[in-house]
Image (tube, helix red, strand yellow):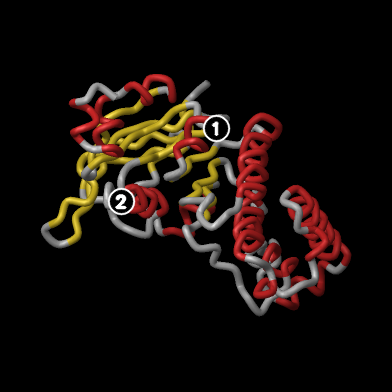
Amino acid sequence: MSNILQIERISHSFGGHRAVDEVSFTVEQGAITSLIGPNGAGKTTVFNLICGILATESGDMRFRGDSIHGLAPFRVARRGIGRTFQDPRVFPEMSVLDNMMVGMRQRGESPLWALWRGERVNREWRAVRERAEATLDAVGLLARVHDKARDLSFGEQRFLSIARSLMASPHLVMMDEPTVGLDQAALAKLTGLMNTLVAGQGATLLVIEHNMDVVMSISKKIVLLVGGKVVASDTPEEIRKHRNMVEAYLGRKHVAAGV
């Protein structure tokens, strides 16, 4: 398969600290790529660079063949990149359904234009609602459709944020620590959903994750960041054997002991 995203020697500094140092990697279309590394490795900074929240100091980023370097976040999103964050970031006072439908802008820009179009607008909204309900059903939240988001558990809010990121049918979904705060049942449900998105719907996922059991079970490729640099990029089988992998997570003494 072809690569949907190419990251080419991007860098970013915070003051005198080089958080991301000429990072390069690719994301294969229709597969799960995991971005891993110890705390402070630069993983979330890389996500913020891709999404346009932070500006790259050098390098380029190409999505579906076109450069997204320097684009504002809303323009990156319009290109077809969806994202979830470490915290769910739901709208607590809005219903679950309204959380899903927010941001699904109709073609008509003004209320008068929308009124003039009449039934066409109604058809569009019905289609959006049907998609929202189908997506909520896929994540197990259809029964909570009229509840306020604040009344959901943390795990349910996590699934709501993931479902909302899928509403616009993005070509690439970026998930930042999606398993944080989930119990074992929710964890199994999430990994099942991620595999279904890829195998059943042809989605592409780029995931930051610390749970190595999850990483090894779902990923086609793993990119290991240490100190803002890519030190390994390979299949789970090869990463598992990689010296830098062991050193980054377990420390030098385990490498010396031959682990």
94 vs 231, nearest the viewer? 231
State left or right for residue 48 relative to residue 10: right
Q: How dense is the environment of label 2, judged by Cα within 10 Å: few (below 14), some, or many (20 and up)? A: few
Is label 2 in a helix, a strand or a loop? loop
Distance from Cα at disc 2 to Cα at disc 1 = 21 Å
What residue lies at 70% left-to-right and 66% top-to-bottom? 108
Q: Image quadrant for the C terminus?
A: top left
Q: Residue 39: give its label.
A: 2
Residue at 66% across, 41% down: 193
Above/below status of 129 relative to 67? below
The residue positioned 80% from the left and 56% from the top of the image is 133
Report which residue position mark 1 lands on.
Answer: 218
- Give the left or right position of residue 247, taking residue 213 as reference: left
Q: Tell me residue 4's x, y (percent).
A: 48, 33
Question: Which amino acid, mark 1?
Answer: Ile
Question: Most extreme residue toward the right, as rendered?
Answer: 119
Label annotation for residue 138: none
Name the image quarter holding residue 171: top right
For marks 2 and 1, the one nearer the N-term is: 2
Amino acid carrying label 2: it is Asn
Residue 89 falls in which quadrant of the image? Answer: bottom right
Q: Residue furthest left?
A: 16
Q: Is residue 104 above or below residue 46?
A: below
Q: Which structural element holds mark 1? A: helix
Residue in front for this viewpoint, 67 or 231:
231
